[in-house]
């Protein structure tokens, strides 16, 4: 989109300048048209499906370290918590385990992540280890929701 040149002080506003302003407003309007592809829908536990313009939605990416060169055992767990800015409703959260140290034993590669609590500003969970060994594991988090 082209930028409109600012008028000089005392410059008379002529038809050409007003045309540029009107044309720029029309371009903005067409880019912000209310099509369904420009909306983000978040299904919340407390209020059902909520739709907002994608520009009004919030996506937060986070990371937490769960264990670093720690000994694990089958059925062992490591808990984590991550705090973020408030959403109107609890956001949709995705958690992905991340092997921090490639020299970890198979214990760091044989894990699962379970979210135990998601609120408007915090997510808690556990990483379950299925193999004995030494592991360095973190969790990548992605929260999508409607900001306050």
Image: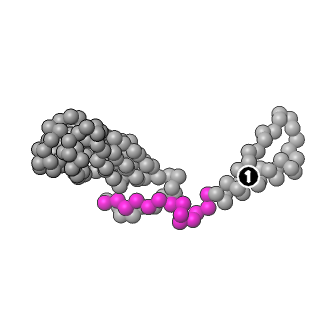
* Quadrant in the picture for residue 99: top left
**Image coordinates for residue 105, horizontal then vertical, percent:** 20, 41
**Image coordinates for residue 8, horizontal then vertical, percent:** 83, 35
Residue, far bottom: 36
**Image coordinates for residue 69, horizontal then vertical, percent:** 21, 34
**Residue 53 drawn above or below residue 129:** below
Q: Residue at x 11, y 48 (%)?
A: 74
> Does the magenta-highlighted stretch encompass residue 122?
no
Of residues 133 and 144, which is closer to you in this image? 133
Q: Residue at x 25, y 41 (%)?
A: 137
**Image coordinates for residue 106, horizontal then vertical, percent:** 20, 45
Please indicate, yes or no, whether residue 94 appears anywhere in the rendered image. yes
Q: Is residue 44 left or right of residue 53?
A: left
> Does the magenta-highlighted stretch encompass residue 40?
yes
Of residues 81 and 90, which is closer to you in this image? 81
Q: Helix, strand or loop at disc 1?
A: helix
User: Callout 1: 10 Å neighbours few (<14), some, many (20+)?
Assistant: some
Judging by the rendered image, the residue that carries numbered circle 1 is 24
**Residue 27 drawn above or below residue 63:** below
Q: Is residue 12 left or right of residue 104?
A: right
Q: Residue at x 40, y 59 (%)?
A: 42
Q: Residue at x 28, y 50 (%)?
A: 118
Q: Which residues are magenta?
A: 32-45
């Amino acid at each position: 989109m082209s930028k409109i040149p600012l008028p000089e002080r005392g410059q008379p506003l002529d038809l050409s300048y007003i045309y540029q302003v009107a044309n720029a407003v029309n371009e903005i309007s067409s880019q912000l048209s209310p099509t369904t592809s420009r909306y983000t829908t978040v299904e919340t536990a407390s209020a059902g499906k909520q739709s907002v313009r994608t520009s009004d939605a919030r996506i937060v990416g986070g990371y937490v370290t769960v264990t670093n060169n720690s000994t694990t055992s089958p059925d062992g767990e490591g808990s984590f918590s991550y705090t973020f800015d408030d959403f109107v409703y609890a956001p949709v959260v995705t958690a992905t385990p991340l092997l921090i140290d490639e020299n970890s034993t198979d214990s760091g590669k044989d894990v699962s992540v379970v979210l135990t609590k998601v609120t408007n500003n915090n997510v808690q969970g556990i990483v379950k280890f299925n193999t004995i060994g030494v592991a360095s594991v973190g969790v990548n988090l992605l929260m999508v929701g409607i900001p306050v």
